[in-house]
Amino acid sequence: MEHGSTLLRDIVVYLAAAVVLVPLFVRFKLGAVLGYLAAGILIGPSVLGLVGNAEQTLQFAEFGIVLLLFVIGLELQPSRLWALRRDIFGLGLAQVLLCGLALTGLLLLLTSLTWEAALVVGLPLGLSSTALVMQLLNERQLAATPFGERSFAMLLFQDLSIVPMVTVVAALSRAPVANPEPGWMMAAKTVGALALLVLIGRYALPRLFRIIGSLGAREAFVAAALLCVMGSALLMASLGLSMALGAFVAGVMLAESPYRHALETDIEPFRGLMLGLFFIAIGMSLDLAVVAANGGLVIALVVGVLAVKATVIATLARSFGTDWRRAIKMGLLLAQGGEFGFVLFAEAERGLLITHQAAQLFGAVVTLSMALTPLLFRLAGRLLAVPDDGSGSRDGPESAGTAGHGGHVVLVGSGRVGQVIAQMLRARGQAITAIDLDAELIDITARFGNTVFWGDGTRLDILRTAGIETASALVFAIDGRWDPKAVLEPIQTEWPDLPIIARAFDRTHNIALRQAGVEQVVRETLDGAVAMGREVLTALGTPDTMIDAIEAEYRRRDLERLDLQLCSGDIMSGADTIIRGALDLDEAPDPASLGEIPPA
């Protein structure tokens, strides 16, 4: 019971610190990440001491990075990942090697470390913080731009390089090991684990989500999404590999699945909370006593790390086609130390290559460099005045620049009506993001080469994940009655200028949609019923001119009655306009007079 109350108290402290400091830092445009770091420093052992055991908190909070990489993987289709191969394996490899070796030389100059110790510290310092960089890119909506994709390509190769770095630390270790594992064995396990994840993600997971989606059990779907992430992380962790890399591979395998938007929506709340906790734990791990005792060295190392990495990364980015202003901005964005540095410093300490005090010192360097990055990135944005959209630059591969959803139509409902609408839009060359809750229907449409994403399109979070912010129109083609006010009010509040076209189930639903502010409403049975009435009249031998006159008169009266009902709110309004007997119509009427419909 005492342990439970202590845990509850710690949770309250974490939440209170985040609630107080994060909005404050956002208000002064310093960024949420810096707010989380400041909250961790404040409540950590070095200041108020409200919570302790930062290492244990950090181990738990690393799941935030796992969830982040899974969400990133969901947004990276294999085709886009292939388009980034030059940046990943060319720019990424050069960045890891050059930054690691340059920082190794810096440590040999500034410290008394041996070359082995300097190497096992310099290589980890060459890594950047995936969590911090992606958070900053997402806050500024740069993740889907060529600038963001090139930055992410380097981060992805850094995650791949963790295994070789662990091998280097193990090879240089001075600690006696009973049965050391050869490097080729670790490499073989890595390839095997990745291949297994690819097979599971390609064949097993889509079937699992299809079964759960067809049952309509949303809680089970959320549980399955978390199981997917944690299972892939566990598989990699059991082999001593990067959990985040496993989650990323699982995400990429599901990137072309129709359940992608629903998965991203359900994972997002957990990702946000865990990432916030991760940054708090990073702040808690900062030992101010170590910083105070070695102030000059810490400052020199922080400045040296930031300067060396920014220079190397900017030069490499420029050599890969990025203009100088964006290259400098990219260098400052990736100049900090990364969260995996803490793991590799601990491995170096266990290998008797560095002391515990040295591990604490370099951990403080990483934390301070992370804390300075949001400020440096914001300053670079002001001084360099680089447009955020990446337009006019040569960043990244040409085919990767099509990541955005700009100008697409979000189509909710892909049944009988939705499929017709989709074909007409495609005939114009219009991009579509279709959403439906019927898993069987999604499979059927896939056989005809159409992609429909699984999810409830009346939910605001699903629509946001589907890219409604950049949509040119929103179409509701779902069957049956649905509450227009409950569904449309939050959408119209968030995006008041977004055109909305809706399918009405019947006359009363039509009126409700119009009253909710939807100007383009289509009654699903009206045109079909009119067409069928025309066929009946034709079968009875009615002349075409008379049929045209009857249809025009019916539509005029129907629209007049609908306007009266809309204005009065009474379904009985305009009842006298209903056709109840034969009309005195000429067989050759004036088309202009009969076709004219007075304005409402």
Image (cartoon, helix red, strand yellow):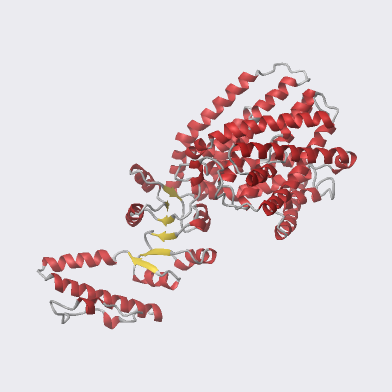
Q: Is residue 438 left or right of residue 157?
A: left
Q: Who is closer to the viewer here, 430 or 230? A: 430
Where is 536 relative to 131, above or below? Answer: below
Q: Who is closer to the viewer here, 434 or 324? A: 324
Q: Is residue 181 left or right of residue 571?
A: right
Can residue 356 be seen here?
A: no
Q: From the image, which quarter does the C terminus lie in?
A: bottom left
Q: Is residue 406 left or right of residue 139?
A: left
Residue 401: x %, y % from top left: 51, 45
The residue at the point 61 percent across, 36 percent down is 319
Give the residue furthest to the left: 541
Where is 503 relative to 203, above or below? Answer: below
Give the residue furthest to the top: 178
Q: Who is closer to the viewer here, 493 or 326? A: 326
Where is 27 relative to 567, above or below? Answer: above
Q: Quadrant of residue 481?
A: bottom left
Can residue 74 be seen here?
A: yes
How many marks can you see? 0
Residue 524: x %, y % from top left: 32, 64
Q: Quadrant of residue 338?
A: top right
The residue at the point 43 percent across, 43 percent down is 210
Residue 85: x %, y % from top left: 53, 34
The residue at the point 86 percent across, 41 percent down is 291
Residue 372: x %, y % from top left: 75, 47
